[in-house]
Amino acid sequence: MRGSLREKKEMLSRLEGYALNFLQEYRNRNGRLEGHINVAIKKWTQPTRDLLKINVNGAYSENGAGIGLVFRGYQGEIQVKMVDRAPGAIDAEYTESLAFVMGLKFAKDFGISHCILEGDAVNVVNRINSKKPDLSVSGSVMEGIRNMLSEFTMVNLTYVKRQCNSTAHLAAQLSLAANGSQFVNFPKNVMVVAEADLN
């Protein structure tokens, strides 16, 4: 019995060594691991020719909540700029969740079946991508988003850092002064940020 236990400990020790070596090799080749989310890039990147990229963001304040959506093609050209109020939003995370809902809704309305959907709300992206039941207040919204995703041929739902989502962030800030859903002409300061994304 003791020999058997010793053999099991040695085997576990070898497995641990293999795992640590694999992890070290991975880090050497790909950089540090960032948890189970996609490793966030540092600047907005253009989608491939066959995809549309949709950046979404929510803004929440005591005075209300709103959403900003920016649809871009493979050359970085802005195809759709939209802001919308988010009545009934109860907090910032709920507002960010609604931004993903609106991004998917408008993609579907425009007949888009393949896209990249990006937002800077890491908790929301993780919860949408999770397979676990979500019993939180916004859990039904997360489940609704998962159901909407299944209606597309391909959607790559990705977390990005704020600097990769700055145009949608500014659009969300503009939405706080909007009266309902609007396709907008961005002010010069937002367009400067959008153009800077391409450099």
Image: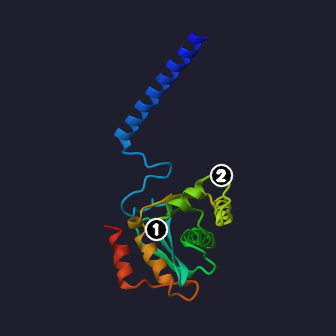
Q: Residue at x 54, y 79 (%)?
A: 66
Nearer-N-terminus badge (1/2): 1
Q: Please name the residue shown 57% across and 73% down the image.
A: 91
- The residue furthest left is 199
Disc assigned to residue 94: none
Mark 2 packing: few (<14 Cα in 10 Å), some, or many (20+)?
Answer: few
Q: Return the x and y of residue 167 as percentages of the image width and height.
A: 42, 73
The residue beneath circle 2 is 132
Helix, strand or loop at label 2? It is loop
* Quadrant (top left, top right, bottom left, bottom right) of the N terminus: top right
Q: Which residue is mark 1?
A: 73
Give the camera-side residue of 78 and 140: 140
Up/down of 191 relative to 151, above or below: below
Horizontal and vertical percent position of residue 138: 64, 66
x, y percent for residue 171: 46, 78
* Residue type, mark 1 in image: Gly
Q: For residue 75, say whether it is visible.
A: no
Residue drawn at point x = 68 percent, y = 59 percent? 135
Quadrant in which the C terminus is drawn: bottom left
Q: Are marks 1 and 2 in contact (CB under 8 Å)?
A: no
* Colouring used for the render: rainbow
Residue 197 in sight here: yes
Which mark's residue is nearer the viewer, 1 or 2? 2
Amino acid type, residue under disc 2 in the picture: Lys
Residue 72: x percent and y percent? 46, 70
At a point 48% along the width and 23% down the height, the residue shown is 13
